[in-house]
């Protein structure tokens, strides 16, 4: 990753720790850490762990995502979409930071937490992922990694162009539903359905390409 992305990612992680530290004294012990589908508290954890779980998750996520491109084997390098990967990493960190703020605010007051803003955030993240799917080249860590996409570069490209549209649409559906007040966790199944359709599509495209005369004679 470029140095600028390292700097931005580091600042986001530091912001997570800073927010947790600034709110720590106002949090009860134990603090609310889990809410049911209606937004009511149904789980707690010690304040120290609850307050810093989000920042620690961000730190681990940032290190892992930054190291992943270095682990790619030869022939499946991620350099071709390094900028897109960096933006996706930063978006993931931003989402965790956003959820951390929501959790700490709700825990501070021992109040309810509506799933609506989380749905909006997750929906936006899914749409961002969809926007960059078409830019990904074959690799073992990101994208629609099926036996058929990894076996054939053309299948990879066709599948990811198709999946990009599906994921942008799925993300918008989740985000708009959240904004409209449809605060239902089952909405998070929408991107799962999009992924399943993309997997089936990759197999169909693979079978079509392999059935062409050039491939049969090869």
Image: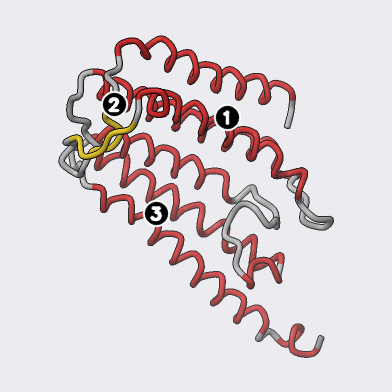
Q: Earlier in the sequence, mark 2 or mark 1?
A: 2
Q: Residue at x 63, y 39 (%)?
A: 65
Q: Which image quadrant is residue 209 in?
A: bottom right
Q: In the picture provided, is 181 more to the left or to the right than 22?
A: left
- Quadrant assignment for the N terminus: top right
Write down the residue under mark 3. 191
* Secondary structure beneath label 3: helix
What residue is pinned by disc 2?
Answer: 30
> x, y (%) of residue 97?
44, 26
Specify whether 72 is left or right of 85: right
Q: CA distance from mark 2 to mark 3?
A: 34 Å
Q: Which mark is residue 86?
A: none
Marks 3 and 1, how far apart at CA: 26 Å
Mark 2 secondary-structure assignment: loop
Disc 2 and disc 1 in contact, CB within 8 angstroms: no
Q: What residue is rendered at 21% in x and 39% in y?
A: 42
User: In the drawing, does residue 139 fall left or right of residue 185?
Assistant: right
């Amino acid at each position: 990753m470029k140095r600028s992305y390292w700097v931005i990612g580091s600042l986001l992680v530091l912001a997570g720790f800073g927010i947790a530290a600034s709110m720590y004294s106002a949090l009860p012990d134990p603090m609310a850490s889990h809410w049911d589908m209606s937004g009511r508290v149904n789980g707690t954890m010690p304040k120290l762990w609850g307050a810093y779980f989000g920042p620690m998750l961000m730190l681990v996520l940032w290190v892992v995502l930054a190291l992943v491109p270095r682990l790619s084997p030869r022939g499946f390098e991620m350099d071709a979409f390094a900028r897109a990967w960096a933006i996706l990493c930063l978006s993931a960190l931003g989402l965790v930071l956003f959820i951390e703020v929501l959790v700490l605010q709700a825990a501070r007051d021992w109040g309810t937490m509506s799933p609506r803003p989380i749905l909006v955030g997750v929906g936006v993240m899914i749409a961002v992922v969809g926007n960059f799917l078409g830019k990904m080249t074959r690799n073992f860590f990101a994208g629609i990694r099926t036996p058929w996409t990894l076996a054939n570069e053309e299948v990879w490209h066709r599948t990811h162009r198709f999946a990009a549209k599906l994921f942008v649409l799925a993300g918008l559906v989740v985000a708009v539903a959240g904004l409209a007040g449809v605060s239902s966790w089952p909405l998070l199944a929408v991107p799962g359905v999009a992924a399943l359709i993309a997997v089936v599509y990759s197999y169909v495209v693979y079978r079509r390409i392999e059935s062409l005369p050039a491939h049969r004679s090869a």
